[in-house]
Amino acid sequence: MVRLLGVSKAFQEGQNSRVIFNQLDGTFGEGEIVALLGRSGCGKSTLLNLIAGLDAPDKGKIFVDGNEITGMTDEQRSLFRRHAIGFVFQFFNLIPTLKVEENLLLPIELKRRIGPEDHRAALTLLGEVGLEDRAESFPDVLSGGEQQRVAIARALVHDPALILADEPTGNLDLETGRQVLELLFRMTRQRRRTMLLVTHSPEVAAVADRVFSLRDGHLEPRELADET
Amino acid sequence: MTEPATVVTSAPTAARLDWKLGETRLVDVGGLTREVKLVALLEPDDELSRRALDQLLVSDIATAQELLGRLGRLSRIDLLVAEGESGDALLERARAAIPDSAMLESTAARQRSTVQMTRAFELNLTALSLLALVVGMFLVYNTVNFSVLQRREWIGTLRLLGVGRRVLLRTVLGEVLLIGLAGTVIGLIGGTLLAGGLVRLVTQTINDLYFVLTVREASLSPWSLLKGLILGVGATLLASLAPAIEATHAPAREAVLRSIVESRKHRAAPRAAAAGAALCVLGGLLLLLPSQSLVLAFVSVFAVIIGCGLLTPLVTMLSMAALRPAASASFGILGSLAARGVVASLSRTGIAIAALTIAISVTVGIGVMVDSFRQTVVEWLDMTLQADVYVSPPAVIATRNDQTLDPVLVERLKDTPGVSASATVRGVDVVSAFGSLRLVALRPSGDRFDGYEFKSGQRERAWLAFRNEGAVIVSEPLAYRLDLDVGEALVLRTDRGDRPFEIAGVFYDYVSDRGMVMMHREQYERFWDDRSIHGLALTASSGVEPDDLVRRVRERAAGMQHVLVRSNRALREASLEVFDRTFTITAVLRLLAVLVAFVGVLSALMALQLERGRELAVLRANGMTPKQVWKLVTCQTGLMGLVAGLLSLPVGVLLASLMIFVINRRSFGWTLQMVLPPALFGQAVLVAVGAAVIAGLYPAWKMARTPPARALRRD
Ligand SMILES: Nc1ncnc2c1ncn2[C@@H]1O[C@H](COP(=O)(O)OP(=O)(O)OP(=O)(O)O)[C@@H](O)[C@H]1O
Ligand SMILES: [Mg+2]
């Protein structure tokens, strides 16, 4: 599903450049839920951004679903993202000027005109995340957990092949976080989608199919049994 | 200088004309060619004398009288009189000694009447520049608002850490002061550069309309620079006070939350609108005061302008709600996002739209005013220019000719074959209780008032009184300014002493805002010794082409006085040319206002771009393409421009009616017909939308180019 070949990325900060990845390789299979662990600042978000094509590597190739996104233009990558990728962030997931349902339908609306069947699908999905009655609300009146549930529904609405979740529960209390995560796992598995999940919690990692740890710019597979 | 035909001039003037000492040159005096010899040069020792002597020829009185054809006449004697009793006694004797046609006047009074002449003109220019300042203040308000909003987290954090409000306010205002100072200094430099060009335009207008003025370069007094500095910095501080206080005095927690700031703005919109409406009503009430005060009229105009500016946020909210379905139908989610985005960032977009509305409505207002004015003048010219050929000496001031025609030439031209009738005019300045007035002695060609439209008084009765009873008619501006009407008497100082003349009518006239008194030539000759003529109008016999007559008249005048012979059409065109030239400066100021508004929209969009970066990144992460970013931003700016453009139409028409019926009336006393040209309105909306969209290009480009990953970081 996702293949990284010799990916290098460095950020320029004034005079000196700061190397994040040097010749990073890695493969995530179809239908897998992969948890990504690592110290703060080791480059987990950067890696997700690279895979989503929101940022470009300095060197190396990235394949998603058989397409080499590193060879695409910004325009092509945007179009690719539209149908292949669903994103959930820690913060700022929803567009404040759009209602819940409009936020949900955003990835489809950017692609084409929506029809009644899209509205029906959106309402069904909202029902799945338990928010069918909030379709007409604006995001700022929802709680943090509710907002994340809308974001999860949106990441799935266009049926993407790959879901990227960057600490989706980092901003929520423990109990709400657990519920949201449980929802995310359940819905991804139901649809047999691939998910790359950044988390700090070994507990969360324990439910993933595979766990990688990002250290010194390399992906290290971790045996679940190693966990303390 | 005691030798005939010798003159002296200043060294700089001679140098510019490349006129060597001892050299004889030809000069044109009212169409007559004379020879003069330069016999000495004056070296001005300071700037003031240099400017006073610029473009001036000095000669012996005898030489001057000969050159100007005014043998035995003096136009002015300057007296230096000692203070105190001896001086007063001397003035008494002087007063007794001078003839009835002359007047004793203090220097101060003379200067006052010169200043008075251009006062309205000056006030109008001042008002226009103040308007630019008002638009500028809207932008400063916007910018400061933005800069404090942008740092609301920073301010909030400092407040949480215990920094006092006073300190924060001082910091913010200190920064504003520095920026205001920098902006003002740049403005002063730009203004000084601009002044060079504007001085030429203004000088031209004054030469056309009032008196001869030679200004070669803009002279900027330190005082006017200081005034600019105070205005610039003061306006900046004033405009930034409200947002600075608001940001630094908000409860510490709230300062952090953007949504609270915006929702407060939304709640403020109706309140601002109410204040705006109240201001407009106040402006209207001010006009009801029975007064001719121009300052009061401008206060009212400004109240209306600022009032309308305050109305814009609410109008924006309402019109975006109205436009959203249409936007969303034609542009899908992007249209919807654009319309909602405008409202969501009302604190930013509202001000930008207000600034753009004001700027565009001012151009609409001035446009309607100038068009109405022009249309009125065109119609008036059609009516008033009845003759076919006009003969006059070359004039230095287009609307006020003081040169005279050679009487022999006048008789000769009247007898040109193909002339069926002729009329003559002579204009002089005469003394009255109201100061110096323009008196025109008219010998009409027919036996009625042809080409005069009366505002007050009955045409036939006025004619009889004018023709047989020695009554005068006065032009509208004069009647307005001096508050005169039919039936009243106007006392003029004639060569036979002060005489009252009955006013038989008030006629429309757009030649000059000073206005004029018109008298029959026979009556004029009864009371004045002057026999000169400065204008001759000839009517062609039927079957004679006016252009042929022009040629014939030119041939007959050849070799005599050099005169301007113009057909009806040429004179009409020349008059309109003067008219158009007069309004060139307003076009410059209009452009300036639009430019300022353009910068306003640009900065508002840059602010939006900075602020909505993260939202845009989320959209990009969900598959928005760079092209769609362009579309979104353009849709948003287009909507903003559309609202500003549409709103500027009613506001512009309102401003135009204020300018036409109040400002113009109080400045010049003219009655103008208002015309509403649809093309102008279409153009205004296009300019508004165009300015907004063009201002959005750079921010759109930046937004489309920014890699989303960066904006997604949570800082
Ligand atoms: N645009 C940028 N310019 C400079 N440095 C950057 C930029 N983006 C990321 N970095 C740096 O790259 C490193 C990796 O950042 P990244 O956000 O990927 O870390 P992370 O593993 O997601 O951390 P966290 O767990 O705290 O979210 C950090 O040290 C960060 O400072
Ligand atoms: Mg991260």
Image (tube, rainbow, N blue to C red):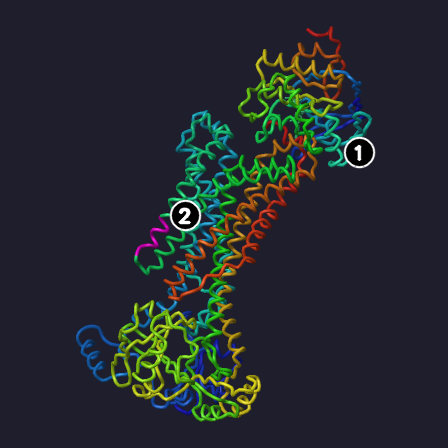
Q: Evaluate whether label 1 is on the same chain as label 2.
A: no
As drawn, A142 above or below B272: above
Is B591 in front, or is B579?
B579
How far apart in space, not on screen, are marks 1 and 2 (Cα)? Answer: 56 Å
Location of residue B427 in the rendering, given as x and y in whole percent from the top left corner: 38, 81
What residue would you read off at disc 1?
A71
As drawn, B369 above or below B330: below
Residue segment shown in magenta: B282-289
- Quadrant in the rendering for residue B272: top left
Identify the chain of the residue marked 1, using the numbered disc in the image: A
As drawn, A44 above or below B485: above
Location of residue B536 in the rendering, given as x and y in whole percent from the top left corner: 45, 85
Please indicate, yes or no, whether residue B555 appears anywhere in the rendered image: yes
Is B251 in front, or is B586?
B586
- For marks 1 and 2, give the one nearer the viewer: 1
Residue B283 in magenta stretch: yes
Please indicate, yes or no, whether residue A212 appears anywhere in the rendered image: no
- Image quarter for ligand 2 equals top right
Identity, as a three-letter code, of the amino acid under mark 1: Gly
Is residue B48 rendered to the left or right of residue B187?
A: left
For mark 2, does the 10 Å Cα neighbourhood hold few (<14), some (14 to 19), or many (20 or more) residues?
A: some
What residue would you read off at disc 2?
B234
| Secondary structure under the numbered disc 1 in the rendered image | helix
For mark 1, does the 10 Å Cα neighbourhood hold few (<14), some (14 to 19), or many (20 or more) residues?
A: few
**Residue at screen point 58% across, 50% down:** B691
Q: Quadrant of the N terminus of chain A?
A: top right
**Residue at screen point 19% across, 79% down:** B92
Q: Quadrant of the C terminus of chain A?
A: top right
Location of residue B705 in the rendering, given as x and y in whole percent from the top left corner: 68, 39
Identify the chain of the residue marked 2, using the numbered disc in the image: B
Identity, as a three-letter code, of the amino acid under mark 2: Gly
